[in-house]
Image: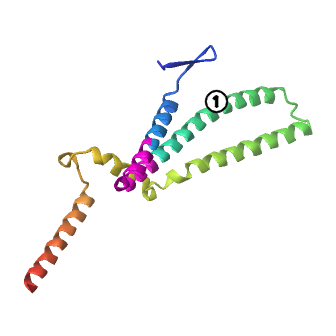
Amino acid sequence: MRPETVSDGSVRPLDPLLKKQKEDVARMRASLLTCSTDISNTSTALKNITVLRIFHQVSRIIRYLDMMDKIEDKLYSSIDAALDRMDDESPTTWMTLLNIQERLQKNMLESHKLLQPYLNIQEFSVIDMAMSSTQSDIGPGNLILNRESRDRLRLSAQQVLDALDIEDGES
């Protein structure tokens, strides 16, 4: 059951996604205020704002897609009804059908553009940024590194130890 809001005497359900968007905007404002009062937190604040902004835009896309689905359901229903009434031999029908087909195909291609940034997830470094901003809440004992990260850490540590051994040998 969704919470409801009352405005102008009508009761409307409050969309949880919209509520989350508003909370995220409030958090962005808070991060900006923190950044402006404490310069040492600027980098963290800007990272937080960037991550929240990306999530905000993704939630907008989700709301857009939800609305587009509703519109398309009505559109397809209406087209179906019109198709049943059309005269197959009329040149007007042909032009109408070609126009509908062209517009549907154009809409499908435009919708696909929304997916483009997410299709190649390996290059999507924002996920890493989001993870690093949430990992600040994770204690060192709870942090689990994948094999590649452990190997890089081990190699870096070995390089530091080797560099220290070289400096000790020169002293």
Residue 18 horizontal/vertical position (percent): 52, 32
Q: Is residue 127 visible to us here? A: no
Question: With 112 as the anchor, is 82 left or right in this view?
Answer: right
Give the residue at x 55% y 48%.
115
In front: 145, or 59?
59
Quarter assignment of residue 171 = bottom left
- Residue furthest top in the image: 9
Above or below residue 125? Residue 171 is: below
| Magenta residue check for 91 | no
Give the residue at x 45% y 59%.
123
Residue 7 horizontal/vertical position (percent): 60, 19
Question: With 136 as the anchor, is 84 left or right in this view?
Answer: right
Give the residue at x 75% y 43%.
103
Q: Secondary structure at mark 1?
A: helix
For label 1, count other residues whose C-alpha is less than 10 Å away and answer few (under 14), some (14-19) or many (20+): few
Question: With 166 as the anchor, is 68 left or right in this view?
Answer: right
- Residue furthest bottom in the image: 170
Q: Main secondary structure of the magenta part?
A: helix
Residue type at numbered disc 1? Lys
Question: With 151 as the anchor, is 12 left or right in this view?
Answer: right
| Magenta residue check for 49 | yes
Q: Which residue is mark 1?
A: 70
In the image, which residues are magenta?
30-51
Give the residue at x 22% y 59%.
150
Residue 8 horizontal/vertical position (percent): 64, 17
In front: 40, or 154?
40
Above or below residue 34? Residue 96 is: above
In front: 68, or 19?
19
Q: Is residue 168 visible to us here? A: yes
